[in-house]
Image (cartoon, helix red, strand yellow):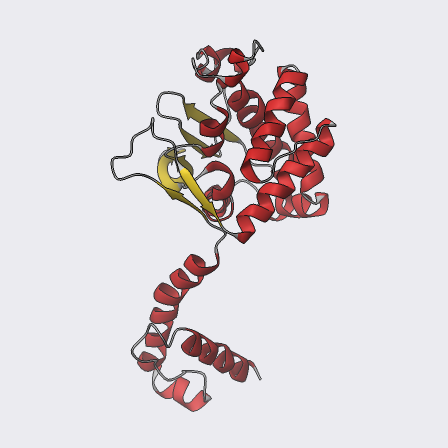
Amino acid sequence: MYHCTLNYIYNLFCTYYSSSSSSCVSSPFISLSLTEATPLVVAQPYKIINLQLKRRIIARHRPRSVAKHPRNWDASTKTSYNDNCFARLAINYLSQSLQSTAGMRSGKEGYEGLVEAATMASRRFNSIQQKGVVIDTLKAALPAPLLLLIKKTVPPSKFSRELFPAFTTIFFAWLIGPCQVKESEVEGRKEKNVVYVPKCRFLEETNCVGMCTNLCKMPSQSFIKDSLGMPITMVPNFEDMSCEMKFGVEPPPQSLDPAFTQPCYKQCKAIKRNHNCGS
C-alpha cells in the first residue's frame, strides 16, 4: 500500500509537469524488487523531484504580490503591485481585523483600506496604544491554538531561526513587499535567519516613520516573541525604505534603538494634516 501510494503521487507529479518536461523517469516505487536490485536507478528520480518539482510547486502556489518597478527604478520611485487572489484576501482580512479592533471603519478596500485604517489608528491613539491595538489585531486574526502549537513544537534553534524567514518570504510578501532570505552570524556561525526587504510596502504606502515604528516594528517584535517564542529585531532603513528582520536576535531597548532617532519624512501625511506621527 505504501509503495502504491508513492507511485500514485509520483505519477501525478509527472502528469502535472509533463507540459514543461521532455520526459519523465519511470517510478521507482512500482516494485520492491526494482528498489532492491537497482538503487542507483531509484536515486535519480529523487534528484528531479527534490530540485525541479519542489521549486516549481512553490513558485506556482505561493501567495504573490508582484511588484512592478520601472526600468530605471530607484528608492524614490513609486512601486506598483499586482496582488493575486490570496494576497487580496489576506490584505482585506487584516484590514477588517484592524478596523474591528480599533473601532473604526474604512471606506476603501485592498491595501489602500489597510493603510487608511492604520492612518486612522495613528491619529486616534498614542504610540503605546497603537502598539496594543496592533497586537490585539494580530491575536484576533490568528488562532491562539495554532500560535501555541508553533511555540511548543518549534522552539528557538537554528532550524526555527531559518524556518521563520523562509515562511515569511513565501507567505507575507503581500504585506511587506518582495523580500529574500540573507545570512548573518548567530553565536559565531552563519545562519539564514534574516529577511531582507529592499523596499517595505507598508513604509512606502504610509510614508511615515512613526507609523512604521509604532504600528509595525514594535508590535511585531513583541507579538512574535510572546506568541511564537521567537525573538526578532526589525531594522528599518528610512533612507531607502528597506528593512531587515533578524530572527533570533533580541531587540535593543527603545531608548537605544536608532529607529527612534529618525525624524519623519517631509511628505509625511500625518504632519501635513497637523497630526503628531509619534516618531
Q: Residue at x 67, y 33 (%)?
A: 98
Q: Is 271 above or below relative to 239? A: above
Nearer to the camera, 212 or 151: 212
What's the residue at 64%, 29% (across, down)? 134
| Vertical position of residue 254 compared to residue 46: above or below | above
Q: Quadrant of residue 77?
A: top left
Residue 211, given in percent of the width and then of the height, sits at 54, 21
Residue sitting at x 72%, y 28%? 104
**Percent position of residue 58, x then y:** 44, 58
Quarter placement of the N terminus: bottom right
The x, y position of residue 101, in whole percent, is 72, 31
Q: Position of residue 118 (x, y in %)?
A: 60, 27
Q: Is residue 196 visible?
A: yes
Considering every residue shown, the one lying at the far front of the view is 107
Q: Is residue 164 left or right of residue 125?
A: left
Of all residues, the one furthest to the left in this rendering is 72
Is residue 261 rendered to the left or right of residue 42?
right
- Work out whether residue 224 or residue 60 is closer to the camera in this orientation and state it: 60
**Above/below status of 76 relative to 263:** below
- Up the image or down, 220 lies above or below 155; here it is above
